[in-house]
Structure formats: C-alpha cells, structure tokens
Image (cartoon, coloured by chain):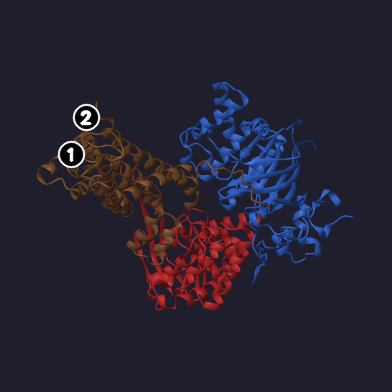
C-alpha cells in the first residue's frame, strides 16, 4: 500500500456576499476513503465539479483537509519527493522566466539531489522522448504536447513512487493525447511508478486504469476493478457517465 | 440546397511580435442553407482564424485577402464588407461563454441589446422576444433566468445564452467556434443537439468548428479537415469520417480512443509544424507514411474526387 | 522584450539623455576647469562667456561645474532612493500578497498608515532634530516612497500565486521563500521596473524641491534645487543662473519619463508595426 485516505473531507468557507452575512460552507469532498497500491493505476472519474481536483490537491498537500487523514505507506518516505503532480494546463506549468533546464533542476535542488542532476534530467527527458537540448529553451518555445512531456520529466527527476495526473490530456490535441497516454504506460512499466489518473473522459479512464473510483458531488459513489464497474454499473452517476460516453 | 456563403482562396495573416504570420492559406468552401459544415483540425491549424475572418473579427493589423467572398448574393470588396455582415445575417457563437458575455449586465439585458441593435425592435417588443428566446434555448423559467448575471449561471447555461444571442440576430449563417468545448460530456451533447435542432428548424447554414471528431461525426452533414492553414480534405461527413482519403485525416481518425483499445494507442509521428517554418511542398509530408517523391517539392492542389469530395494530396491526383 | 524596448524612439531618446547626464556627472568633475565652490572674484554674476561657459553666480562660482556636481548628487539620490523604496516595497508587497489573510491585513494597514504621513512635515521634523545630510535625505525619501511599489507588487503576486507553475512548485516541496524570490518576484518585475523609473524622476524632483526650500542639500554643496534658490534674488538680471539648473531638472525628468513610458509600452506590446513580412 502506497497511500491511503481515511474519510477525507474538505469544506470551504465562502464569505457572505456582504460583510455582515455569515460565511456559507461548500463541501467539496466528503468522507473519501481510498487506497493506492504500488505500481497500479487508480482512475478517478466524474463530471466537473465532483471534487476530483480537490482530491488531487489534498493528496499533493497543497491544501489541508477539514477532517480525515492521509496515511503514507512504507514506500513513501518523503511525500514531497515521492508524490508528484501533473496538471491539466501545460501552457502554465512552467515559470516563463526560467529555462526548461532550470525548471527541471528545481525539484532536485529542493530535495538535495543536485549531484547527479545532469544524469537524472537526461534520463527523465529520454523517458519522455524529448531532446536534451530543450533544457536550453524557455517554455514558450515548446508546443503544448512538448510542455506536458517536459512537465512529466520534471515530475520524474526525483524518482517518484506515485504520479497524480489531474486531467493531463484535456488541453491537448487528439494525436498528442495518444502520445502522452502511451508514454505514461511505458513509464509505469519501466519505472514501476503508480498512477492516480483523474479525468472526466470515461474512455481514457477505461483505457489506463486498473481500478476506478467514480465520483459525484464530492463523494465516491462506486469503485472497483475497471472492467467490473463499467460492465455492471450500479450507481446512477456511473450509468449516466456511461450513457453520455456511449452516445458519441 | 441554396448556396448562401462562398469563400474562394481566403488567406489570413496575423500580426505577431516578430512580423506577420500567414495562418490560413487558400481556404475555399461554401455553406448551404440547412447544412452543417464541420471544420475539423487540431489546435493551431487555422480554423478559428478562418471563422473570425468571415465577419472581420480579427485583431487589428491583420491582413485578409481572398479571390471571392459572397454572402447571400453580396460580393465582398474587402474586410469591411464582412464587418457589415456581423449580426446582419451572420451570427457567431464562441467557445468560452464567460469571456463573451458582459459581466456587468444581466443576461436578459444582453439579449435585449442584441435584439434592439440587430433587428431594431423597441424596448417592449425586445423584452417579450428576449424571454421567448431564453425559453427556446432551454433556460426556463425565462422570467427568472433573464435577471441573472453571467457569473451566477453555470458554464453550460451561459453557453445557451450565447445561442440565444445568435438566435436574436435571426441569421442565415451561424458560425459556431467550439461551442461545446469545456463542457461535460452530457452537457456537450445536449447543447450540440440544441444547436443542430435550431439549425434544422430555421434552415441555417452552419460552419461548426471543432477539434472533437466524435462530436463532428454526430452533428455534421459535410466535413472539412484543416492542417497547417490549408484545407486538406472535404466531403460528405459520412464519407470523410468512415473512409478518409487524406493521410492526415486517416492518421487523426486512427488516434481516437476506441472502446476496445488496448496496449499502445496509435499516434502521429512528429509535431505540427510551426507556421514560420513550414516544410517545403505538402505541409504534412514529413509525418506521412505514404509520401511520394513529389510531396516535398510542390504544394498539392485540391483534387476533386467522386461524390463531391476534394483532397489536397498527390496520392489522389486526378489526371 | 528588451529588443522591443531598445527599438522604441522614446527609449532611445531617454537613454541618450540619461546617458549624457550620467557621463557628465562621472567625468565632468574631473574635466571642469573650475571647482564647484571656487570663487572667481573677477567674474561675479557674469553671463556665459569664454572663461565660464555657462556664466557665474553672484558669488563668482562657475555655473557649469556646479551643474555637473549637482548632477552627481541628484542622480545619486534619485537612484538610491528608488533602490531602497523598491527593495522595501517588494519585500512588503510580496509577503502580503503571498501569505494573505492576517499578514496581508496587517501589512496593508501599515501601508495605509505610511501613506497618511505628510512627507514634507516629516522631513521638516527630522531636519529639526538631525542634520540634513545626503544620507538622511536619501533615507527619508526612500522610507516614505515604498508604498506604491508595495501595492503594485502585492497585486501582481496575488494574481501570480494561483498560476499553475506556482501550485506545482509547492507540490514538489518548494519553500515559501523560494517561491517568492525565485518565481513570484521575477515575474512581477515588469510593472515594478516601470514604476521604479518614474520613481527616480519623482525622487529627483523631490530632492530639488527640498533643496530649493533649504531643507535638502545644504550649500555650499551644489544641488540643482539650491542653485535655483540662489538664483531667486537675481531672477530679473541673471537669466543664466536660473535657466541652466532649471533646464537640467526639466531635461532629466523628460528623459526619465520617456524611458518609463517606453518601458510601459514594451510591457504591453503596444503599437507594433507589423508590415515587415518575414521572407517566405
């Protein structure tokens, strides 16, 4: 077991529209309990607003839960290093002020792995099939697909155990999407990294995931092995997603 | 079916920090009453630029040139003629509703404004008609919805408001640029169904731009595929999507995730070329598995095929 | 962006003028035949001529050498004041913008309080207690001029901190200081630089005003401001005594404003000429 959550809940306090009004609360996530095993791909699927991104941010420790906890297994000694986030928008994933090389080096500096920096970066770039000379360029010089691959490389330099992918292909073209998905499959095999793959696209989730969790309105409505859940959906939310996917 | 809009050899150049850049070249197509023409292509292929050029909505300093541009019998002299067609016969729906609605006015007021400006209705008539339009696009009850501001409505609802604004113009041509992108799957289909239904009911000629091939398959009557600023294939939607003739179309369709897809997914080798460094000859040839000797020498012309199809590829050259 | 900036006529004009002033202030004192406070009793209040190119004041001091010495003082004060103001402003603004909440509230109220201080009276009070040395003037102007930068930086940081690359940096363990110093501040630099350029102009003008009132640089050290003060009594009879310091102030301000406007336009990619089609 790499990571497990126990009744993870996140409630946002939204201030009232005028200053004397009491704040209203919005429950983004409620009692979410899931586990990710080593080397597996767990798919999280649901419509927009169901709390998938909130879950991703909680797992990457960008926000703190209102209640519930995250337990790290023996494989995850340093969450900041061993869990890496791949985000949806590749066009904003890099600091425009730094070169790609400087951005790739930053996680290594933070975690004290600078000694073998060049090797690690070289290996990561090779794994995502980018030329080493992209390190000299600014991110603006790369296409969307290249930037997402560079973001993947940055996530790989520290040798993570878990990649949290939050809609990594939604902003990319069809042909590039296939490339990235193929790449992720290769990385899983080569580096043995586990994936938490979040998407609203059922076809993608079906293709990449070993197990899936279907989410709706902040809770997990159904979970299980991908094939089982999608062949015999029990919850109306799951059925709704399948219907929409089937119609196109 | 009557031809409403005819475009011949449209070329568009956009201003960039380092000089003008040609983004669309020699684009030719026509729109017919009651017919939906889908323009399909990946990001940066020039489809949005083409759409914006038709009603002169390009950024300042852009340069548009064409051999012929005719709308409803009116021949355009230059870009300013296109500007006069805005709202007067040609309506636009864009991608991000929140960016195209004024946050300071409630949606009812925005629909009324369009009615008053394009159709010259008076206040009272505009009020009634606006409510009717909001109802028609599924925003019920209209009396309540019309008082909401864009930030109080969801993305899908705002997109419907854009459809209402298009309806308000009583157009003959609708240009829809990715109207369903960013919405959930279910909403996407609903909205597409709404637009398609309205188009059939009003007999609109529709230019529907999308990068979502699955959606295009559902809505299109005819389809055209763009790559690196040129149209590479055109024909009846069914023909193009089931038996594509251009290698790019074939490769693109193969990339789609099929339900039974397993293992490695097909992708297209290489990258979309930079507009400033297009390959010599056919822009797709470096990535094409079927290229011939002449593909890197000269740009192929559009060769007509059977069934009203056209392909810009030497493989289909008609002697 | 630097290329675009250097192509603009405003920028070239501004750089040229400022460059001239800088060169004059650095080389001038070594080249000028007269010392700024040397008295030439044979030539009291003489108009521009062969021995004194820009004339002399009522005490027989050469206007040109005093002008050049004054340039040194004015430019020094202008740049150092802005350096201090920007440093303090960026620190406070970035911290407030990044941490938000209580920290933001406290710091911004500090800014509000600082803005309430009438600078002139503060300076008067300080002068009454301490001596009006160059250092003191720089400190006072610097410590009363950081608020604009603070607000500017805070606004930039507020919008930058929700950018994807900042979120990602936090997720792979970047510390707060690393994010602020390495990611937020460099990306917020644009408007800060523009404000700084205008700030130099404002500081030079402020110093000139103070010196004119006798609260700034004290004679015999020449400053454009106190040269104008000296010229007050001879306004009708010696046009050269007030014209040249006045013109110097005017020109440096025009130059700095041109630089600032060019920088602002470059930042916004304004008004480009697109007719150069790349050869295809």
Which residue shows up at 85% across the image and 52% down it?
B305
Quadrant for the C terminus of chain B, please: bottom right
Of A161 and A44, the residue lying toward us: A161
Tell me the subunit letter for badge 1.
C
In terms of image quadrants, where is residue B255?
bottom right
Where does residue B164 sit, x and y in percent of width and height? 59, 35
Mark 2: which secondary structure? helix
Question: Is residue A195 shown to the viewer in this render?
Answer: yes
In the displayed structure image, the side of residue B311 where residue A13 appears, left or right: left
Tell me the subunit letter for badge 2.
C
Name the residue beneath numbered marker 2.
C234
Q: Which chain is red?
A: A
In the displayed structure image, the side of residue A41 where residue B203 appears, left or right: right
Name the residue beneath numbered marker 1.
C41
Where A53 falls versus A196 (above or below)?
above
Where does residue C216 sit, x and y in percent of width and height? 19, 42
In the displayed structure image, the side of residue C136 where residue A28 appears, left or right: right
In the displayed structure image, the side of residue C37 where residue C78 appears, left or right: right
């Amino acid at each position: 077991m790499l990571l497990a959550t126990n009744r993870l809940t996140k409630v946002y306090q939204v201030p009232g529209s005028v200053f004397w009004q009491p704040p209203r609360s919005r429950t983004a996530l409620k009692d979410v309990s899931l586990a990710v095993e080593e080397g597996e791909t767990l798919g999280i699927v649901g419509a927009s607003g169901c709390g998938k991104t909130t879950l991703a941010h909680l797992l990457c420790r960008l926000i703190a839960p209102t209640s519930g906890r995250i337990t790290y297994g023996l494989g995850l000694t340093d969450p900041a290093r061993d869990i890496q986030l791949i985000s949806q928008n590749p066009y904003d994933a890099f600091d425009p002020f730094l070169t790609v090389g400087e951005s790739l080096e930053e996680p290594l500096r933070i975690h004290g792995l600078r000694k073998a920096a060049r090797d690690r970066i070289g290996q990561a770039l090779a794994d995502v099939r980018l030329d080493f000379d992209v390190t000299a360029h600014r991110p603006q010089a790369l296409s969307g697909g290249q930037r997402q691959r560079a973001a993947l490389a940055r996530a790989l330099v520290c040798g993570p155990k878990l990649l949290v992918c939050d809609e990594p292909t939604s902003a990319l073209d069809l042909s590039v999407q296939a490339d990235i998905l193929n790449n992720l499959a290769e990385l899983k095999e080569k580096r043995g990294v586990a994936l938490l793959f979040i998407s609203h696209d059922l076809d993608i989730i079906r293709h990449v995931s070993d197990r899936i969790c279907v989410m709706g309105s902040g809770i997990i409505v159904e979970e299980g092995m991908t094939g089982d859940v999608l062949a015999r959906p029990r919850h109306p939310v799951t059925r709704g997603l399948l219907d929409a996917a089937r119609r196109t | 079916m009557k031809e409403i809009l005819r475009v011949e050899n449209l070329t568009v150049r956009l201003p960039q920090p380092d000089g003008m850049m040609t983004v669309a070249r020699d684009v030719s197509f026509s729109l017919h009453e009651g017919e939906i023409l889908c323009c399909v292509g990946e990001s940066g292929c020039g489809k949005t630029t083409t759409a914006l050029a038709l009603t002169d909505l390009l950024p300042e300093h852009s340069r548009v040139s064409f051999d012929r541009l005719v709308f409803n019998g009116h021949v355009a002299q230059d870009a300013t003629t296109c500007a006069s067609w805005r709202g007067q016969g040609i309506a636009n729906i864009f991608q991000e509703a929140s960016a195209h609605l004024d946050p300071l006015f409630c949606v009812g007021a925005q629909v009324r404004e369009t009615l008053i400006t394009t159709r010259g209705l008076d206040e009272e008539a505009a009020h009634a008609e606006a409510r009717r339009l909001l109802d028609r696009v599924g925003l019920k009850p209209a009396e309540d919805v019309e008082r909401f501001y864009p930030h109080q409505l969801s993305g899908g609802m705002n997109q419907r408001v854009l459809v209402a604004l298009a309806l308000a113009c009583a157009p003959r041509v609708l240009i829809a640029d990715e109207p369903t992108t960013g919405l959930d799957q279910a909403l996407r289909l609903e909205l597409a169904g709404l637009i398609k239904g309205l188009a059939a009911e009003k007999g609109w000629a529709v230019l529907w731009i999308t990068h979502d091939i699955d959606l295009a398959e559902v809505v299109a009557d005819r389809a055209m595929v763009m790559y690196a600023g040129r149209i590479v294939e055109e024909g009846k939607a069914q023909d193009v999507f089931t038996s594509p003739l251009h290698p790019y179309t074939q490769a693109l369709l193969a990339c789609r995730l099929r339900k039974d897809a397993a293992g490695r997914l097909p992708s297209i080798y290489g990258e979309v070329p930079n507009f400033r460094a297009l390959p010599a000859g056919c822009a797709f040839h470096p990535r094409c598995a079927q290229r011939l000797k002449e593909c890197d020498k000269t740009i192929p012309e559009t060769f007509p095929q059977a069934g009203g199809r056209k392909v810009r590829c030497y493989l289909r050259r008609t002697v | 962006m630097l290329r675009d900036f250097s192509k603009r006529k405003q920028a070239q004009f501004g750089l040229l003028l400022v460059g001239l002033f800088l060169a004059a202030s650095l080389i001038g004192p070594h080249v000028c035949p007269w010392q700024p406070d040397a008295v030439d009793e044979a030539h009291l209040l003489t108009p521009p001529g062969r021995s004194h190119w820009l004339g002399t004041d009522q005490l027989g001091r050469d206007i040109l050498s005093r002008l050049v010495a004054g340039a040194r003082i004015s430019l020094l004060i202008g740049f150092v004041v802005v350096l201090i103001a920007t440093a303090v402003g960026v620190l406070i603004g970035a911290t407030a913008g990044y941490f938000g909440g209580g920290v933001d509230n406290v710091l911004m109220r500090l800014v509000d309080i600082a803005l309430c201080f009438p600078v002139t009276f503060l300076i008067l009070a300080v002068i009454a207690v301490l001596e009006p040395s160059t250092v003191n003037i720089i400190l006072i102007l610097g410590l009363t001029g950081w608020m604009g930068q603070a607000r500017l930086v805070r606004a930039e940081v507020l919008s930058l901190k929700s950018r994807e690359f900042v979120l990602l940096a936090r997720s792979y363990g970047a510390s707060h200081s690393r994010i602020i110093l390495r990611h937020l501040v460099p990306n917020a630099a644009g408007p800060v630089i523009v404000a700084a350029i205008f700030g130099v102009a404002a500081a030079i003008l402020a110093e000139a005003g103070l010196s004119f009132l006798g609260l700034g640089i004290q004679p015999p050290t020449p400053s454009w401001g106190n040269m104008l003060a000296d010229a007050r009594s001879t306004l009708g009879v010696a046009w050269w005594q007030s014209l040249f310091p006045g013109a110097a102030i005017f020109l440096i301000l025009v130059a700095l404003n041109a630089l600032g406007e060019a920088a602002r336009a470059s930042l916004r990619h304004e008004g480009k000429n697109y007719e150069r089609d790349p050869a295809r």
